[in-house]
Image (spheres, rainbow, N blue to C red):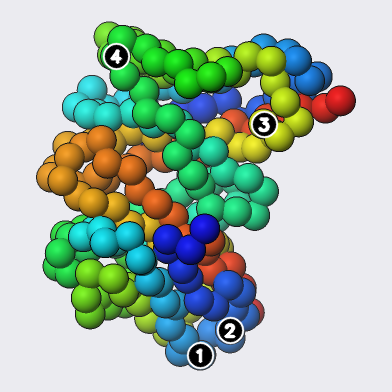
Amino acid sequence: ETGVTQTPRHLVMGMTNKKSLKCEQHLGHNAMYWYKQSAKKPLELMFVYNFKEQTENNSVPSRFSPECPNSSHLFLHLHTLQPEDSALYLCASSQASSYQETQYFGPGTRLLVL
Amino acid sequence: RKEVEQDPGPFNVPEGATVAFNCTYSNSASQSFFWYRQDCRKEPKLLMSVYSSGNEDGRFTAQLNRASQYISLLIRDSKLSDSATYLCVVSLSGGYNKLIFGAGTRLAVHP
């Protein structure tokens, strides 16, 4: 399935590096999300964009910076990360018109911070 | 208290067994309820929505008890391919689908 794609799939970076994660959805949705999934923990919502406008920032540290240039693309810019930021970062999209709409997830970027 | 609480398991069951997962949620304002499935090293995928009247999809039955803030998933005639982590998910009000995930219950079906 290629409804939501994410690149890169794996990323290893040092604490002083700057990198970006990319997400693209081909489903015509108007809402996009970033989640973090750490080992043995529930998925944590990080950011929500509705119609390209950020509507949620779930107390995420400023070393994570989202960007949504249009309703199909979402980026997560990373800088000066910490080892505890190592996790699976998942992008999702949905048609935000009702409470019952389904979120579709991308395959995720597995990030390791050294 | 966790917003969505699940037994982490693992549940180890033989093929053909019936297995039930339970989930409780803390926010009485929760609007919608779902079960997602996540295979090892893959993304979560919607398994089924959960409705107040209860609903069934083949071998899977979901129940919701709003008064007790309790959700369940029953899997009948388990298959090897059912092995995965099952995520209980609730949606809060707010104009968009803000999902709160449980940590998941791991199921391992063996021959």
Q: Do labels 3 and 2 share a chain?
A: no
Give the image location of residue B80, x and y in percent.
76, 31
The chain carrying label 2 is A
Q: Mark 4 points at which residue?
A: B52
**In front: label 4 or label 1:** 4
Q: Could you say whether the residue bearing mark 2 is in a helix, strand or loop?
A: strand
Q: Name the residue under label 3.
A: B82
Give the image location of residue A75, x and y in percent.
35, 76
Q: How far, Cα to Cα, is label 4 from label 1?
A: 49 Å
Q: How far, Cα to Cα, is label 3 from label 2?
A: 35 Å
Q: Which residue is drawn at 33% across and 33% down?
A: B90
Q: How far, Cα to Cα, is label 3 from label 4?
A: 25 Å
Question: Which residue is the extreme one toward the bottom?
Answer: A17
The chain carrying label 1 is A
Q: Which of A106 and B87 is in front in this view?
A: A106
Please tell me the numbered disc located at residue A13.
2
Q: What amino acid is labelled 1 in the image?
A: Asn
Would residue B34 be found to the left or right of residue B39 on screen? Answer: left
Specify few, some or many for label 1: CA neighbours under 10 Å numbering under 14, 14-19, or 20 or more.
few
**In front: label 3 or label 1:** 3
Q: Do the residues labelled 1 and 2 touch (CB within 8 Å)?
A: yes
Q: Which residue is drawn at 25% across and 58% down?
A: A29
Compared to residue A20, the image places residue B88 above or below, namely: above
